[in-house]
Structures are given as structure tokens and as C-alpha cells.
Amino acid sequence: MNSKRTWPETPEPIWQDDHHIDTHPSLTESISTDVVIVGGGMTGITTAYLLSKAGKKVVLLEANRLLNGTTGHTTAKITTQHDLIYDELLNHFGAEKAKHYYDANNQALQFIRETIDELSIQCSFTEEDAYLYATTDHYARKLTNEMNAYHKLGIHGEFQNDLPIDLSIKGAILMSNQAHFNPVAYLSALVNKVKEQQGQIFEHTVAIDVEKGLNPIVVTKSGAKISCQTVIACTHFPFYDGNALYFSRMYAERSYVIAAKTKQSYPGGMYLSADMPKRSLRSYQKNGESLVLFGGESHKAGQGHQVTNHYQALKFFGEEIFGLSQVVNRWSAQDLFTLDKLPYIGRVTKNEPNILIATGFHKWGMTNGTAAALLFRDYLLNKDTPYYDLFSPSRFHADPSIKTFLMQNANVASEFIKGKLSFTKEISDLAKNEAGIVRVNGRKAGAYKDSKGDLHVVDTTCTHLYCEVNWNDDDRTWDCPCHGSRFSIDGEVLEGPADQPLTNLKDDLD
Ligand SMILES: Cc1cc2nc3c(=O)[nH]c(=O)nc-3n(C[C@H](O)[C@H](O)[C@H](O)COP(=O)(O)OP(=O)(O)OC[C@H]3O[C@@H](n4cnc5c(N)ncnc54)[C@H](O)[C@@H]3O)c2cc1C
């Protein structure tokens, strides 16, 4: 990237910049192992590390390159301060479960800290104070309830009237001894340990199905199969859902990050607004230079409209507090939310003890993903923990699940109808680097004209549940507004729940 530019032309996260990640072969022949872990992000790599350390024979599969999913696009705060959550958990699940959620995440933070120490990992791990702040009276009242929940649950926190940064607030909760790091540096070190511990890693290997049984078999796109004792899907959206309809019980939220050099120095700390629009801040040292990461602007995936506006809003926010001299990187990504805010970690369905999933980390996957890996280790080593029940994907809690379920599915229905009615354009009117909804042989299609003038044309009906995908003008992807699937300009699946590509209509052009 040209350091003289004040705005990065293409989205690119900061974490890979100074880190080399080894490449791995793809799987070309059928093999067998103890455990197949699918998905090379925070959850899958930590699970592979823990299980290979415990003496299990593991195979880790990744559809693309390791650490290219949400983990490679995170902001990497490692904290148990997960926005406003403890008051809600206390009210809906009771004190015991709310405390278990805190404990599971706190143990995860502690595990990351100890692992970095034990393996001497150079990953810019930095202890920080975390602040959750409110700028309106409405959210200040919510913060007071949250503070009361901390007291009831024995969580350490202090109410503050001011922040170390220059923001006018109505109150904040300080949680000390939290942290941030470079997740790619941390996980690259765990990848090396997995290999030292005889684990096998395959990239560009897409798992497409599981043949159930005492010894389940993971089927890959190339036809190679892996038989094993346990399958663990750490694929963000589960690649195999056992007909448990996870798409109707989760939704994807996308958000944006800019990394910038600031004119005023950053006083330290990590910050998150309780109120909307969401704002998240942390610092990062890149090649000796101090950067501030500004995150936020969340919206339901596929419903973001003008992407550049989201980045501009973050830039404006940064300008106001610190003055920005250069935006060095910018990127966006999405994470999955369950209806009751607790992740799904455990058996994909009640009746399948050897097919496990971990998903729905609601933007707190550094600790929740690690907690999932620790749970999987305990499960495979037959150790008891209170977290099996807490995170069980088969749980059903009437409130707030039902209300959120109805709201979520009403939104899906409205997007479904909207998409069917959307605007069409003449293919000949498209400029270079422009996309539009066009007609090809009387059929609705999405066309993108690339910088060379070549056309890429796909059927815009999502292969998952037939909503119409929207164009994302920044990432140059087709994004589904209903369940968050994403597709490349030629229709390949980039993110599920869809597992089939959009139909490529290039050959249908006259
Ligand atoms: C903008 C943003 C900021 C965030 N900030 C924070 C933060 O500060 N702190 C925090 O705790 N959390 C944060 N999160 C959340 C956190 O980053 C995620 O929850 C976490 O990275 C998810 O990790 P994962 O391993 O479950 O998924 P991923 O990292 O997405 O890994 C899943 C992998 O599975 C692969 N895969 C998918 N399907 C298949 C298949 N069929 N076969 C093979 N491989 C497959 C994918 O290619 C991918 O590499 C943030 C999220 C976002 C979007």
C-alpha cells in the first residue's frame, strides 16, 4: 500500500500485513483420523491446537486460506465486556447461567494470556482497560442496570463519569485487565504447534457434507473423504446443520473498521459505545507506528446500501476526537448472532453426539471461539463442565428467542419481497467497475463490468432460500439480505448458509 495515500483504495485488514502464514496442500485422497475440524479461524485453529496437544489425531480443513474468514477481519479485543449483556442474561437465564457465561469467557481470556506466555508468542498482546460508555440518558440508564448486574454476579467493574479520551458521555463502566492482540500472529503460532503435534492441515478443501454414523465421514468438494470419530464444524455458519434450521435461528451483522494515524496521541484503553451508532476503539502498533482502529456502523448483512458512507462515518468520528493524518487500512466483515445472544456450541442436534458446531459469537469470538475450543477439548476427554448446557445448540428459551425469531423472520420476508421488485438496468449502460440488475434473455440477472470491461453475470436469486442478492460496491460481492450469504462476481460461495454457487449466466449473453 502506498503510504502517501490518505485513503486506501481497496479493503484490506491490517493483521496479515507483517505476518507470513504458511500455505498448506489441499486434500486429494481419502484418509482417516480421530477428529476432523472444519474451518481455519480462531475457533478451528484453537480447537486443533488443544486436541492435538491432548494426543488426538486431528485434521483441519479450510475452504480457502487459513485466517481469511472473520478472524482475519476482526478488531481482536479480548475481553469479557461484551457490550450490554449481563443484565439481559441475568433477567432471561438467571444468575447462575449469566455467571457461567462470564466465567467461560474469562477462562478463555486467561487461556489466551497463558498460551502466549507459555509459547512466547510475539503477537502484540497488550493488557488494557475496557470501557463501555453511553452518550444518552436512555443508555446511561441501561449502563446503570448493567453495573448492578456486575455487582450481583461478582464481576469486577467500576462506574465512571469521564473517559480518558475526549468524548462527552453520560457514564461508562470500566473493566480492568482486558487485552487486545494481533490474532493472525497468535494463531499462526498455534498452527505451527498443531503441525509439531502431528496435526494435518489442508487448505482450499471445502467440506460439503457429513455421512452420519458411529464413524462419521466428511465429504469434500473434490470427492476426497475423511472418516473419523468426531466432526467439529467451526465454519462460522455450520457447513452441515443436521436439518436444525440454523439459518432461521441466527442472523449476520456486518460492520466496518478503519485503522488510522492520529494527530493527537491515543491515551490507551479500549472503548465501546453502548448506544447507536456503535463505535469501537483500540490501538495497534504497526512497525513502530501508533494506529487507532475505529470500528462500528453495524447493519444486517446485505442491507448496508452505500458501503463508502459507513467508512466515511467512522472517519468523521475519528477526525472529531483525535484528528486523522492518514487512514492506513479499512475493511469490513460479518459475524453471526443467535436469537438469545448465547453462542451455539455443542452437538449439532441432540441425537448426534459426534457432530459438533460452534457459531453465533455476536462479535465476541476471540473469547467465545476460545471458550468453544476449550469446551470441545473437555467433551472429547469426557470432562464435565457447566458450559455444555449453557451453550447447547438444542436449547430453547421462550423469551427473548420467540420475539427475536419473529422479528428476524419478518425482516427476511420483507427483504424477500423487496428483492423481487427491484430495479433493472440495460447491460450496455454499465460503466467499468459498475454493477446493476439487468435482464438477460428476459431473465433477471446481476451484471458487473470489471476494470478491463469484461462482464460477469449471475442469476441474483440466492441458492439458499431464493431471496434476491444485493450488490456490495466496495467488496465487489453479491450479498444476500435475508440470511447473509455472500457470493463472488462469478457466483462462487464466499460465505454461507448458501452452499451452492449462484448460476453463472455469462454464456447466456448474446
Ligand atoms: C468487524 C468485526 C469486528 C470484530 N471484533 C471483535 C473483537 O474485537 N473481539 C472479539 O472477541 N470478537 C470480535 N469479532 C468477532 C470475531 O472476529 C468472530 O466471532 C470470530 O473471528 C469468528 O471466528 P470463527 O473461527 O468462528 O470463524 P472464521 O474466522 O470465519 O473461520 C471460519 C472458517 O471456516 C471456513 N469455512 C467455511 N465453510 C467451510 C467449508 N464448508 N469447508 C471448509 N472450510 C470452511 C472459512 O473459510 C473460514 O476461514 C468481530 C467481528 C467483526 C465482523
Image: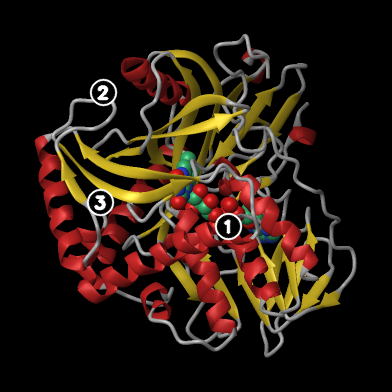
Q: Position of residue 435 (x, y in %)?
A: 60, 24
347 to 99, vertically: above or below: below
* Rendered position, 220 above or below 466: below
Q: Which mark sits nearer the N-terminus, 1 or 3?
A: 3
Query: In the image, which is nearer the foreground, mark 1 or mark 2?
Result: 1
| Residue type pointed to by label 3 | Leu
Q: Is residue 184 above or below residue 230?
A: above
Q: Quadrant of residue 268?
A: top left
Secondary structure at numbered mark 1: helix
User: Pointer 3: what residue?
Assistant: 84
Q: Secondary structure at mark 2?
A: loop
Asked whether, in this view, residue 283 is left or right of residue 435, the answer is: left
* Residue at numbered disc 2: 166
Please name the amino acid that badge 1 sits on: Asp
Query: Does any portion of residue 497 appear in the rendered image?
Result: no
**Residue sticking out furthest to the right:** 29
Counting from the top left corner in percent of width and height, residue 469 is at: 53, 40
- The residue where tag 1 is placed is 117
Residue at left offset 16%, top offset 54%? 147
Is ligand 1 closer than 8 angstroms to the Cβ of mark 2? no
Q: Quadrant of the C terminus?
A: top right
In the picture, which quadrant includes the N terminus? top right
Instruction: Assign a secondary structure to mark 3.
Output: loop
Q: CA distance from mark 3 to mark 2?
A: 22 Å
Q: Amino acid at mark 2?
A: Asp
Give the x, y percent position of residue 227: 77, 80
